[in-house]
Image (tube, rainbow, N blue to C red):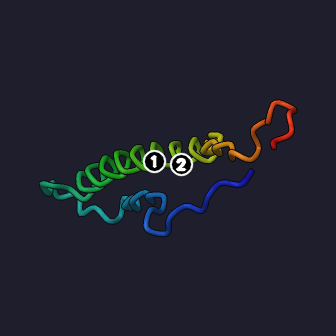
Amino acid sequence: MSLPPRPDDDPRPQPPVCPDNDDCCHSGCDPCIFDLYDEEYGRYRAALAAWEAREAERQAQAKAPRKQAAKPASPSAAPSGGKPSR
């Protein structure tokens, strides 16, 4: 069974790019580029957790059996009791 396609408007979050050590000026900036990265990485982790929950729900829905409405019996299909009508 294949999964339904993932909506194009809900892609998996991508992690932020970690700055190189050379990207820091080492002059004690507040906030430092690494502080900003840590904040962004925290937001990424939260977004990823939310996306994984949505993805798990999507997969669970794909695996769940679909319920079909019961078809009502037609009156002509009911047994007549074996007696011919007159």
* Mark 2 touches mark 1? (CB < 8 Å): yes
Q: Residue at x 85, y 33 (%)?
A: 83
For the residue pair 19 and 40, the one nearer the viewer reads as 40
Q: Quadrant of the image for the C terminus?
A: top right
- Residue 56, image x, y percentages: 53, 43
Mark 2 residue element? helix
Q: Residue at x 51, y 48 (%)?
A: 55
For the residue pair 37 and 9, the one nearer the viewer reads as 9
- Residue assigned mark 2: 58
Q: Number of marks in the image? A: 2
- Residue assigned mark 1: 54
Crowding at mark 1 (Cα within 10 Å: few <14, some 14-19, many 20+): few
In the image, farthest residue toward the bottom: 8
Mark 1 residue type: Arg
Asked which quadrant contains residue 14, the reply is bottom left
Mark 1 residue element? helix
For the residue pair 23 and 1, the one nearer the viewer reads as 1
For the residues marked 2 and 1, what is the alpha-carbon distance in whole angstroms?
Answer: 6 Å
> Is residue 66 in view from this perspective?
no
For the residue pair 57 and 30, the one nearer the viewer reads as 57
Left or right of 74 on screen, residue 56: left
In the image, farthest residue toward the left: 30
- Residue 33, image x, y percentages: 25, 59
> Is residue 28 in view from this perspective?
yes
- Residue 28, image x, y percentages: 15, 54
- Mark linked to residue 66: none
Q: Residue at x 36, y 61 (%)?
A: 19
Left or right of 32 on screen, residue 61: right
